[in-house]
């Protein structure tokens, strides 16, 4: 038997995202092929604190790629948020000989990883969140699938909204970011898009625009409302009362997080998973992996946290023009 090059552990943390399984599979198979032992940690950071991990084989990750969710389970760990929790996790990694921890998760999970690195654990992060709210990368695992799922749901909603000549408020996820809402807004040809980064809380103007749309002959309306704005039921009531148009609210909720990952999510997650192992091979420490301008790349975790990103003004402008707002300016 040949000597192992070292122990790597991989976990998923925060909200599950379609494509996480593809990333785990790539980490495991690339890791094994380059001579490492790869451990799968269950239930996010809790799995380290509770020592819930197993050595994974090439076969353990068969038949996972095409499924949403995460077969390692995920969690939002309250204990790990505490300083004591991080110290304990670092001590356990050291005791078990885990040199590198690969964290697949969102901004919260990366904050945890950054803090853990201070205690001497080498951390490598893969962006796994449907929210796309991570500054250093143009792509996050799961966003593409979630947007496509929401888009299909909104297509269905439009048919019933159209048949009843209603106004429909549809709320999509994204936490405090409006990326899913903006993409659905464009992909579904929404009449209005409300996102936290741009909406000025001018409900009077919104209602005026809805009335004007109707007056111009529009028989129904889709308003995509981001979770970061929320209050969709209240908004629907307000619109109905102010306009007399029958209005319904639909909150898509967690169905947006499930489902078989799209080709993009499978491919990018796989490439990033393999790249994580390449970073380890090169002796890189505390890196986050992402996509910039179409290419996979890695960045220092501290540097990544200094970066900011914002909604693309041009995309938002296009969304407005392709809705109906332009007629009334
Ligand atoms: N400041 C922090 N310090 C230590 N750990 C943290 C911190 N913030 C978050 N974490 C850890 O990361 C976990 C996941 O974070 P969070 O719930 O924000 O989800 P996320 O990784 O951003 O993913 P998503 O937003 O897609 O659900 C938390 O439950 C916690 O264990
Ligand atoms: O699954 P939970 O804990 O209800 O979290 C929901 C949140 O997680 C996400 O789905 C992913 O961050 C957000 O869009 C949403 O705000
Ligand atoms: Mg997050």
Image (cartoon, rainbow, N blue to C red):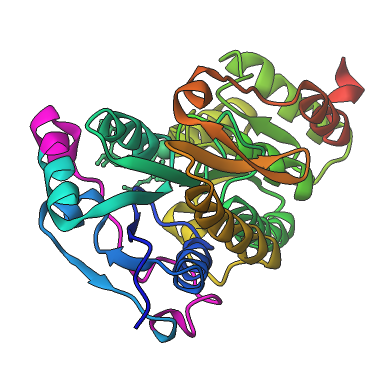
**x, y percent for residue 93:** 19, 50
Looking at the rendering, in which quadrant would you find the N terminus? Answer: bottom left
Relative to residue 288, is residue 190 drawn left or right?
right
Task: Check the image and report above or below for 254 versus 235.
Answer: below
Quick one: 244 or 285, which is closer to the camera? 285
Residue 312 in percent (x, y) is at 74, 26
Judge whether residue 124 is colored magenta.
Answer: no
Determine the residue positioned at 59% across, 67% down: 261
Residue at 82 percent of width and 35 percent of height: 323
**Where is 52 relative to 189, above or below?**
below
Which residue occupies 58% across, 31% down? 239
- Measuring from the top left, give residue 299's x and y in whole percent: 56, 32
Is residue 77 found inside the magenta-colored segment of the image? yes
Q: In this view, does 101 lie to the left or right of 296?
A: left
**Residue drawn at x 56%, y 20% as measured from the top left:** 307
91 left or right, relative to 290 = left
Quadrant of ligand 2 in image: top left
Find the magenta span and give its range: 60-87
Is residue 245 visible in the rendered image? The answer is no
Residue placed most toward the observer, 287 or 144: 287
Snapshot quadrant of residue 152: bottom right
Q: Main secondary structure of the magenta part?
A: loop
Query: Could one spot residue 80 in this view of the protein?
Result: yes
Quadrant holding the C terminus:
top right
| Residue 79 placement: quadrant | top left
Q: In this view, does 30 lie above or below 188?
A: below
């Amino acid at each position: 038997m040949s000597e192992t090059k070292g122990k790597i552990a991989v976990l998923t943390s925060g909200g599950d995202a379609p494509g996480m399984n593809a990333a785990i599979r790539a980490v495991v198979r690339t890791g094994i092929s380059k001579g490492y032992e790869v451990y799968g940690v269950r239930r996010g950071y809790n799995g380290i604190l509770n020592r819930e991990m197993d050595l994974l084989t090439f076969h353990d990750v068969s038949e996972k790629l095409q499924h949403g969710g995460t077969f390692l389970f995920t969690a939002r760990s309250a204990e790990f948020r505490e300083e004591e929790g991080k110290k304990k996790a670092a001590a356990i990694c050291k005791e078990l000989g885990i040199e590198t921890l690969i964290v697949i998760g969102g901004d919260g999970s990366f904050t945890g990883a950054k803090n853990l690195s201070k205690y001497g654990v080498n951390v490598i992060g893969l962006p796994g969140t449907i929210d796309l709210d991570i500054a250093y990368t143009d792509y996050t695992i799961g966003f593409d699938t979630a947007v496509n799922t929401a888009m299909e749901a909104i297509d269905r909603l439009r048919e019933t909204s159209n048949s009843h000549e209603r106004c429909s408020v549809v709320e999509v996820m994204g936490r405090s970011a409006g990326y899913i809402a903006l993409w659905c807004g464009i992909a579904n040809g929404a009449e209005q898009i409300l996102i936290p980064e741009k909406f000025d809380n001018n409900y009077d103007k919104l209602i005026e625009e809805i009335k004007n749309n109707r007056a111009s002959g529009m028989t129904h309306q889709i308003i995509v409302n981001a979770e970061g704005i929320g209050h969709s039921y209240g908004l629907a009531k307000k619109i109905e009362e102010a306009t007399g148009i029958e209005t319904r609210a639909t909150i898509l909720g967690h169905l947006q997080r499930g489902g078989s990952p799209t080709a993009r999510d499978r491919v990018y997650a796989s490439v990033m998973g393999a790249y994580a192992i390449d970073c380890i091979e090169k002796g890189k420490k505390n890196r986050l992996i992402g996509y910039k301008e179409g290419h996979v790349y890695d960045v220092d975790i501290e540097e990544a946290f200094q970066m900011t990103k914002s909604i693309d003004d041009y995309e938002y402008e296009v969304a407005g023009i392709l809705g109906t707002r332009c007629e009334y300016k």
